[in-house]
């Protein structure tokens, strides 16, 4: 009996191991974001200039949870009315994916088509409501911004809610950092071998 009591007492005294290490990366990211927001407040913000001749595309992630039956059409009209105030901007079209949250980028057909059109020099400014329309992963967003900025004809993204323009002068040095760009000797994965491509998402 005494042995059982001792075992019970020892069990109660055992301390749950700490998993704080799992929170360290997230805490560091939140700290860096807070510092970045504080820095942005101290500088003059840059947005796409109305007088600059942009080829503009609007990316929308549509998920109708509103009380408005024609919300998508209403939303599109708002964009068109605003773009019309910039006579040097050429509207290239809406790119619309459905879903409450952003999936893997390669599964978003409209976003993928938009990127192809950017590479084809059909678009040089993307306007979208918020960063989470494109991806919830900051690394993916940064990678996309850098790849688009590195094109022969750079493409910028303007996120309305966050008031972020990826081609702003204060981002220029970071965007040109070659560390995040594909190596010159890169090779594309063959389309007929799904195995290696699938490993990218494991």
Image (spheres, grey):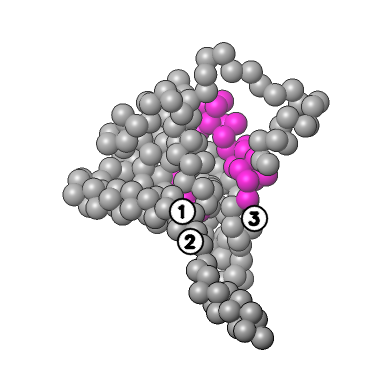
Q: Position of residue 9 (x, y in %)?
A: 55, 79
Query: Is 73 displayed left or right of 145 in the figure?
Result: right
Residue indicated by mark 2: 18
User: 35 or 7: nearer the eye?
Assistant: 7
Residue sitting at the far right:
192
Q: Can residue 86 be seen in this view?
A: no
Q: Is residue 12 visible?
A: yes
Residue 122 magenta-highlighted: yes
Residue at point 38%, 31% (across, down): 175
Q: Position of residue 195 (x, y in %)?
A: 77, 32
Name the element at disc 3. Answer: strand
Start-end of magenta stretch: 103-132
Q: Distance between the residues labelled 3 and 1?
A: 36 Å
Q: How far apart are marks 2 and 1 (CA)?
A: 8 Å
**For the residues carrying marks 3 and 1, which lies nearer the camera in this image?**
1
Check the image and report above or below for 163 versus 188: below
Residue 119 magenta-highlighted: yes
Residue 118 has which mark?
none
Residue indicated by mark 3: 98
């Amino acid at each position: 009996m005494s042995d059982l009591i001792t075992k019970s007492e020892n069990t109660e005294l055992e301390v749950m191991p700490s998993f704080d290490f799992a929170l360290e990366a997230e805490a560091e990211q939140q700290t860096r974001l807070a510092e970045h927001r504080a820095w942005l407040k101290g500088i003059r913000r840059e947005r796409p200039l109305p007088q600059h001749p942009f080829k503009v595309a609007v990316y929308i992630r549509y998920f109708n949870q509103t009380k408005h039956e024609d919300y998508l059409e209403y939303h599109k009209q708002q964009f068109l009315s605003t773009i019309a105030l910039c006579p040097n901007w050429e509207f290239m079209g809406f790119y619309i994916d459905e879903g409450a949250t952003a999936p893997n980028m390669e599964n978003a057909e409209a976003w993928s088509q938009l990127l192809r059109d950017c590479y084809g020099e059909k678009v040089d400014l993307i306007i979208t409501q918020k960063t989470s329309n494109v991806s919830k992963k900051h690394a993916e967003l940064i990678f996309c911004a850098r790849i688009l900025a590195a094109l022969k004809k750079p493409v910028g993204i303007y996120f309305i809610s966050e008031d972020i323009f990826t081609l702003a002068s204060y981002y220029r040095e970071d965007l040109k950092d070659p560390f995040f760009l594909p190596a010159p000797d890169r090779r594309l994965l063959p389309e007929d071998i799904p195995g290696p491509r699938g490993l990218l998402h494991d």
